[in-house]
Image (cartoon, helix red, strand yellow):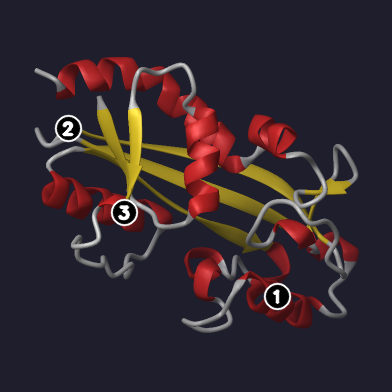
Amino acid sequence: MKIVIATTNQNKLQELKELLQGFNVELLSLRDFPACPAVREDGKSFAENALKKARAVCAHTGMVTIADDSGLEVDALSGRPGIYSARYAGDEADDRGNYEKLLREMRGAAPEKRGACFCCVLAIVSPSKTEKVVTGEYRGVIISEPRGHNGFGYDPVFLDTASGLTFAEVSPEQKNRISHRARALQKLRKILPCFLDTANR
């Protein structure tokens, strides 16, 4: 069975492929559907954005679609960047631009205010209008200088306090065992067999 992952981000796609190993599914991405209209992520929450993307891509492709919206919520910034994580430094900003803006805003923050939470919401939608939403979270600390060369997004400045390493320093395999996306996928894996069975009827 084919499932569309509603992203052009190859890092996210690869993570999801690894986390969904064992299921008899072929994962496609938006790169396989260049005519698919862009979806404006103007929801007020991760869940709203994920559902909006999944519904729109499912309607266009006629296939079961999984969409995620994820981001970083920082205690010292009252939960920012949140749903704006991917474009925190502007619509054309890259990962480095985003985390450098974050570090500038975090200068002088007290240690007890440097806590942060990565949040991932996954929405799965079928052509029969069946919908499910799951959430995964992982707490850590924002450090003052980037470290590591793995991962993407804010990984170089997000410290996993359990290991003492940033998400950009741990191996992809280790990250895929503990991350917010891994936790959301673990929940999705539990409902996916029943969901796919319903979608195939």
**75 and 98: which is toward the camera:** 98
Spatial separation of the CA atoms under disc 1 and disc 2: 38 Å
* Label pair 2/3, CB-CB below 8 angstroms: no
Give the residue type at disc 3. Leu
Say if 104 sits above or below 52 in the image.
below
Tell me the quarter of the image containing the C terminus: top left
Q: Quadrant of residue 25?
A: top left
Mark 3 and mark 1 in contact? Answer it, CB < 8 Å: no
Count of residue discs: 3
In the picture of the structure, the residue carrying the numbered disc 2 is 130
N-term mark: 1 or 2: 1
Residue at image position (70%, 39%) is 172
* SS assignment at label 2: loop
Residue at the spot of label 1? 102
Q: Is residue 105 above or below residue 82?
A: below
- Of residues 182 and 94, the one nearer the viewer is 94
Q: x and y percent of residue 14 in the render?
A: 52, 42
Q: Which residue position holds label 3? A: 30
User: Disc 1 residue type?
Assistant: Leu
